Image (cartoon, rainbow, N blue to C red):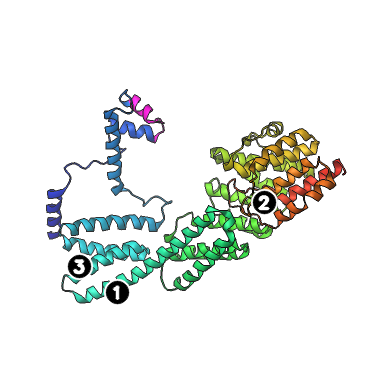
């Protein structure tokens, strides 16, 4: 009763006179607040102009519309304190705990600010226990500091010492967690700045790894362990040691299984995708296929992660010469009803995959491929596909190079040389003046090879001779592909170059 009495006094004295929350299920659906909310939610309003004209028949710069927007925003912000993640399977248990702990800690701080320590301290102790359960180090430290301060002034020295020592331990753990996070972000940022920094970033990664290896066994921390594994995986990737990178990924998978409530539901899927990417780099078909069969049992068909996984699955088959298996993966993807909901860029990637499969069926006489890849969902029509020249776009670099290359291969089959010259001219725009050995280096070497074909007037011996150096440079660098359009090789450049030379040999001798 005393606790309730104290809360009633505080709330009646200091509460806001009117707490405005938003409830889309309320009966007042004729209000302008609901009209604006519903219009945005259902995408009926695509702009402020649409909303202002429909609600007030006015310009969006008028005061009444601006006030409506501001008040709706405040209602929505107030409602953030009353979210429920319990039934959301996409929210991991630790994030749910983080939300609850933050709310409880906020309430306790408000109570302490108003002198209600008798109610606040038990709440802080309860929050600390939950934070400890979920390794929420920031909140643990905040709670222990509050409890340390409370017991230092309440003549309870024994309890003060307990929380003083606990706070020191948590501070050390938080310091190492923050360090691991900073190290990981520094590695990613340095590599993203210039992919030519690989040797430098590898040394940086090795240095950070040594520091964290000494700390990871000292602290019970999910964040620290995951950052340590991420950095270790990057070190092996920068060393082109993808077998070791797979081993680290398997350690991460085991760690996630042991503590599932610390991770998002999709974490195992993300690790499975990462592993499949490593199999593509290794060109390890049998192990990759075994991994695919196992992973596809647990990844929901038609989900974003499923489509992402299947791209690597397709590329593994293409890069290892298992073209019929690649065609079957293509068929599985296009049979999904969700395929139509993919972005245009992703659909165009699968359309390009279809063009390569069609070429392989034609040139290698793999007749079983043809009925598998015939699908109207991509809108693939060979003549239309060959006629279209994609506009220069750095963001679509890998995809556009793949499109122009397969078009070149088709025209070479026909010995139709003018369109080849046109494609090579378009593709040369993607070459830098001074190429660096980064993620784009292989594609630039391959563009040089294509240029030599035209410059040597399609003569086999001269082309092969003048291309030796560029070919050696290209093969000295390992493929580096991490999804999307960047550095995409639908077929390895070495394979496509051999196909071109074989065709040139049958066309014209030097």
Residue 360 shows in this picture: no
Q: For the residue carrying disc 2, how many other residues have a C-alpha within 10 Å: few (<14), some (14-19), or many (20+)?
A: many
**Tag 1–tag 2 contact (CB < 8 Å):** no
Identify the element where label 1 is drawn: helix
Q: Is residue 55 above or below residue 473?
A: above
Point out the tag, 3 or 1, that comes first from the N-terminus: 3
> In this view, which residue lies farthest toward the top?
57
Between 47 and 3, the residue placed more toward the observer is: 47
Q: Nearer the viewer, residue 243 or 466?
A: 466
> Residue sitting at 63 percent across and 58 percent down?
279
Sequence order check, earlier mark of 1 and 2 = 1
- Mark 3 vs mark 1, CA separation in Å: 15 Å
Mark pair 1, 2: CA separation? 56 Å
Of the two numbered discs 1 and 2 in the rendering, the one whose residue sits closer to the viewer:
2
Which residue position is annotated with label 3? 150
Q: How busy is the neighbourhood of tag 3: few (under 14 within 10 Å), some, or many (20 plus)?
A: some
Residue 195 forms part of the magenta stretch: no
- Can you tell which mark lies on residue 165? 1
In primary-sequence order, the first of circles 3 and 2 is 3
- In the image, the segment drawn in magenta is 41-54
Dot 2 falls on a residue whose secondary structure is helix
**Residue 98 percent coordinates (x, y):** 35, 57
Percent of width and height locating residue 245 = 58, 63
**At which x and y percent is residue 317?**
68, 52
């Amino acid at each position: 009763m005393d606790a309730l009495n104290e809360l009633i006094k505080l709330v009646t004295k200091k509460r806001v006179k009117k707490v405005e929350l938003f409830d889309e299920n309320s009966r007042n659906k004729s209000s302008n607040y609901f009209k604006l909310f519903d219009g945005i939610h259902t995408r009926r309003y695509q702009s402020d102009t649409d909303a202002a004209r429909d609600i007030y028949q006015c310009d969006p710069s008028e005061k009444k519309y601006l006030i409506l927007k501001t008040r709706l925003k405040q209602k929505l912000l107030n409602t953030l304190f009353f979210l429920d993640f319990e039934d959301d399977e996409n929210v991991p248990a630790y994030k749910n705990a983080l939300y609850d702990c933050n709310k409880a800690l906020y309430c306790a701080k408000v109570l302490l600010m108003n002198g209600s320590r008798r109610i606040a301290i038990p709440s802080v102790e309860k929050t600390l226990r939950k934070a400890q359960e979920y390794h929420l180090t920031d909140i643990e430290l905040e709670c222990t500091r509050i409890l340390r301060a409370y017991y230092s002034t309440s003549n309870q020295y024994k309890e003060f010492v307990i929380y003083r020592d606990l706070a020191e331990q948590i501070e050390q753990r938080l310091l190492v967690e923050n360090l691991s996070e900073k190290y990981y972000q520094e590695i990613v940022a340095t590599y993203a700045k210039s992919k030519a920094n690989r040797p430098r970033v590898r040394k940086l990664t090795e240095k950070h790894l040594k520091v964290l290896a000494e700390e990871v066994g000292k602290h019970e921390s999910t964040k620290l362990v995951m950052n340590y594994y991420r950095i270790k995986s990057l070190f092996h990737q920068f060393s082109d040691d993808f077998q070791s990178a797979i081993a680290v990924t398997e350690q991460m998978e085991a760690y996630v299984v042991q503590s599932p409530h610390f991770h998002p539901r999709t974490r195992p899927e993300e690790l499975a995708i990462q592993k499949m990417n490593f199999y593509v780099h290794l060109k390890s078909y049998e192990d990759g296929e075994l991994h695919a069969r196992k992973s596809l049992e647990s990844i929901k068909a038609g989900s974003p992660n499923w489509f992402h996984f299947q791209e690597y699955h397709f590329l593994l088959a293409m890069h290892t010469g298992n073209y019929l298996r690649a065609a079957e993966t293509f068929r599985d993807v296009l049979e999904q009803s969700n395929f139509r909901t993919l972005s245009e860029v992703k659909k165009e990637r699968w359309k390009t995959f279809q063009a390569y499969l069609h070429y392989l069926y034609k040139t290698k006489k793999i007749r079983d491929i043809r009925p598998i890849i015939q699908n109207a969902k991509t809108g693939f029509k060979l003549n239309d596909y060959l006629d279209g020249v994609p506009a220069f776009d750095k963001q679509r670099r890998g995809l556009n190079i793949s499109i122009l290359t397969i078009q070149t291969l088709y025209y070479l089959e026909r010995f139709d040389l003018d369109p080849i010259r046109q494609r090579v001219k378009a593709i040369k725009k993607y070459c830098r003046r001074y190429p660096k050995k980064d993620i784009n280096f292989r594609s630039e070497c391959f563009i040089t090879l294509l240029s030599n074909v035209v410059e040597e007037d399609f003569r086999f011996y001269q082309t092969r001779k003048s291309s030796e150096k560029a070919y050696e440079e290209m093969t000295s660098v390992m493929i580096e592909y991490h999804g999307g359009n960047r550095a995409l090789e639908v077929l390895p450049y070495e394979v496509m170059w051999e196909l071109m030379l074989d065709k040139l040999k049958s066309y014209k001798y030097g």
